[in-house]
Image (cartoon, rainbow, N blue to C red):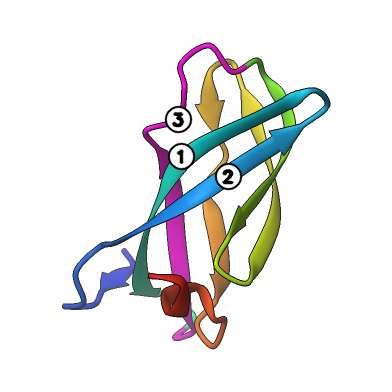
Amino acid sequence: MPEIFEDPIVRIPGVLRAAGVVAGCIVETWKERASSGEICTRGRIVNDPPQLPDGPYLLRFGRCAIPTNKFEGYWEPIVMAADSQLREAA
C-alpha cells in the first residue's frame, strides 16, 4: 500500500481544454511513496462541469500542461514525478 505523506492535499485551479471545450476545474494533489520507494505526486480533477464529454483533454495549471482523459464520466488519475513543479502552482 502506498505511503501517504503528512502534507495536506493542495487544491490548484486548472483549465481543461479539448476540441471546442474550455472549462475550469480544481486539481487536488498530494505526495505518495510507492511500494518501489519512489516518491511521486498524485492528483485528481474535481469541481469540473458535469456536462463535459468523454475524451482526451489537456489540463493546464501553474506551469504544468498534462494530457488526460475522461472515460465513462471519470477522469484518469494524475501521476507526476515528485520533483515536478506541481505544488508551486498552489
Q: In the drawing, does residue 78 fall left or right of residue 13?
A: right
Residue 45 in magenta?
yes
Identify the mark nearer the N-term, 3 or 2. 2
90 over 76 or under it: above or below = below
User: Where the C terminus falls, by quadrant?
Assistant: bottom left
Residue, disc 1: 25
Question: Residue at image x 51%, y 50%?
Answer: 14
Residue, disc 3: 48
Identify the mark nearer the N-term, 3 or 1. 1
Residue at mark 3 to residue at mark 2: CA–CA distance: 9 Å
Image quarter of residue 81: bottom right
Query: What is the x, y in percent for residue 63?
Result: 62, 72
Closer-to-camera residue (70/37): 70
Image quarter of residue 7: bottom left
55 over 56 or under it: above or below = above
Q: Amino acid at mark 1?
A: Cys
Give the crowd class for mark 2: few <14, some 14-19, many >=20 residues within 10 Å: some
Q: In the drawing, does residue 67 fall left or right of residue 70?
A: right
SS for callout 3: loop
SS for callout 2: strand
Residue 41 in magenta?
yes
Question: Residue at image x 62%, y 28%?
Answer: 70
Query: What is the x, y in percent for residue 28?
Result: 36, 54
Residue at mark 3 to residue at mark 1: CA–CA distance: 4 Å
Residue, disc 2: 15
In the image, the segment drawn in magenta is 37-52
Q: Amino acid at mark 3?
A: Asp
Do the numbered discs 2 and 1 sit on residues whose CB atoms are within 8 Å?
yes
Q: Residue furthest top?
A: 51
Q: In the drawing, does residue 30 fall left or right of residue 38?
A: left
Q: Is residue 35 visible?
A: no
